[in-house]
Amino acid sequence: MSTDNFKHDLFNHFARIAKAMSHGYRLELLEFLAQGERSVDALAQVSGLGVANTSQHLQQLRQAGLVANRKQGQKVYYRLSGLDVSALLASLRKVAECHLADVDRLVDDYLNIKDSLEPVPAGELLKRASAGLVTVLDVRPAEEYMSGHLPGAINIPFAELKKRLHEVERDKEIVAYCRGPHCVLAFDAVVKLREVGISARRLEGGLPEWKLEGLPVES
Amino acid sequence: MSTDNFKHDLFNHFARIAKAMSHGYRLELLEFLAQGERSVDALAQVSGLGVANTSQHLQQLRQAGLVANRKQGQKVYYRLSGLDVSALLASLRKVAECHLADVDRLVDDYLNIKDSLEPVPAGELLKRASAGLVTVLDVRPAEEYMSGHLPGAINIPFAELKKRLHEVERDKEIVAYCRGPHCVLAFDAVVKLREVGISARRLEGGLPEWKLEGLPVES
DNA sequence: CTAATATTCAATAGATCAATTGAATAAGCT
DNA sequence: AGCTTATTCAATTGATCTATTGAATATTAG
């Protein structure tokens, strides 16, 4: 049956993509890449893996078509091969949240403040930010900010937030964002800001989700 | 670092879901389940796997939260655990089509008639069908038709199409659909219908995609 | 040209996964 | 109760995957 072979081949190709995503570290790499282009050793550092190991994982992702790379000088820069990869990751996240009880519990335990933080939808933030009503705060590391961020956002990496609190206007509301819906940086930032009496909320989702909605990005 | 553990745990859970989808047979099972609820042996038959084997694959899918089951009498019926699982599969398909050159070639080779078949978008079909302008033809096996189909669709399984050609009205256009965008049944049906001079097109996507758009289903 | 940096390749051992087989459980039928 | 059907469990073998290590390649700097 040639049509059966077609079907098997096709599903095997789909499976190859899923297999590329079937490892925690590779998913972490994908999340970092969703923030912007990165070199191999930057990814190795941030993920805590060895360089050779990181390189091999990246190659698996590349063979599955999830990432692409370009060589500039001595460095090789990897990037997601498209927005649809971000969309795939978002789908995966959603299924996990809805149907994997463990994930739900984990998220509730760690981000138990979740509901009390009143996440701001992307569309609403865009309106209020362009009207100058809020300060948009990017709490990701500087390199991630530099390779793309929300329009008008200021960058104070979470690690430096305590020292640089004076940089934020205290009379405007702050909306913080980070890497994505399960990144703890924005959660923690909002808590820290509120501790010192600054009105703060977090964006629903992070930069990848913002891009997925087709909203503008500045760099 | 407790926040790092949280991240690792979370991504490991996501990876479990991807791992469940990282096997061709399991993806096939998911596509069949996207047509409706099925018992283990029905799935074993249609997938060509042994029953024990099928059962074990289904259990992996269940542990990943992708499917759910209920026991009725001596049979256990499995189903997708939600529409978001269909959405995840659709995302996977899209990434494969866009970024995996092999898939593109495979699809072009097999469904080379693809573009000439002028697929009908779901929204358009709904309008024209409710206006009585087209006959909607479901070419999937009878069991799949019975567990849910497009409103007003008639069912002639592809295998029986040749013998039952007389059942279709020759003066109305026919729109055929099957399991999904890469299922060959609707393609082949359209070709066969055109051979005998009947005006035919195919629906863009299949029943799962129809459901995903929130359109009504009859059973 | 030589040294240093960034990345990839190759080989290894330990772990996990897949398909098969036969037995065990559980529900209905006679 | 015994028999049949549907599903799951358990154990095996062969295959594939992961992390680590050290060497090989390529590009830039001195």
Image (cartoon, coloured by chain):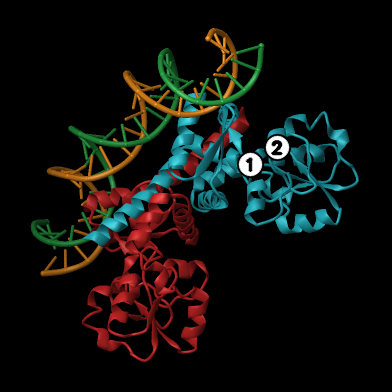
Chain colours: A cyan, B red, C orange, D green
Looking at the image, can residue B85 be seen?
yes
Secondary structure of residue under mark 2: loop
Q: Earlier in the sequence, mark 1 or mark 2?
A: 1
- Residue at x 33% of width, y 56% of height: B28
Could you say where residue A212 lies in the image, as x and y percent from the top left? Answer: 62, 54
On the image, the x and y values in percent for residue B203 come to: 43, 74
Q: Residue A42: where, in percent of width, then height?
A: 60, 29
Secondary structure of the residue carrying numbered label 1: helix
Left or right of A218 on screen, residue B155: left
List the residue tagged with mark 1: A35
* Quadrant of the snapshot with the N terminus of chain B: top right
The three-letter code of the residue at mark 2 reads Arg
Taking the spot 36% from the left edge, 72% from the top edge, the residue there is B147
Q: Amino acid at mark 1?
A: Gln
Question: Residue at 42% across / 86% down in the picture?
Answer: B134
Residue at the limit of the structure toward the right, as seen here: A171
| A168 relative to A206 in the view: left or right | right
> Is any part of residue B41 visible from this angle?
no
Contact check, label 1 and label 2, Cβ < 8 Å: yes
Image mark for residue A176? none
Q: Which one is in front, B46 or A97?
A: B46
- Of A40 and B3, the residue lying toward us: A40
Check disc 2 and report the residue beneath it.
Answer: A140
Q: In this rendering, would B101 be left or right of A215? A: left
Q: Quadrant of residue D18?
A: top left
Q: Tell me how far mark 1 sits from mark 2, CA to CA.
A: 9 Å
Query: Which quarter of the rendering shows the C terminus of chain B?
Result: bottom left
Give residue A85's position: percent from left, percent from top. 53, 49
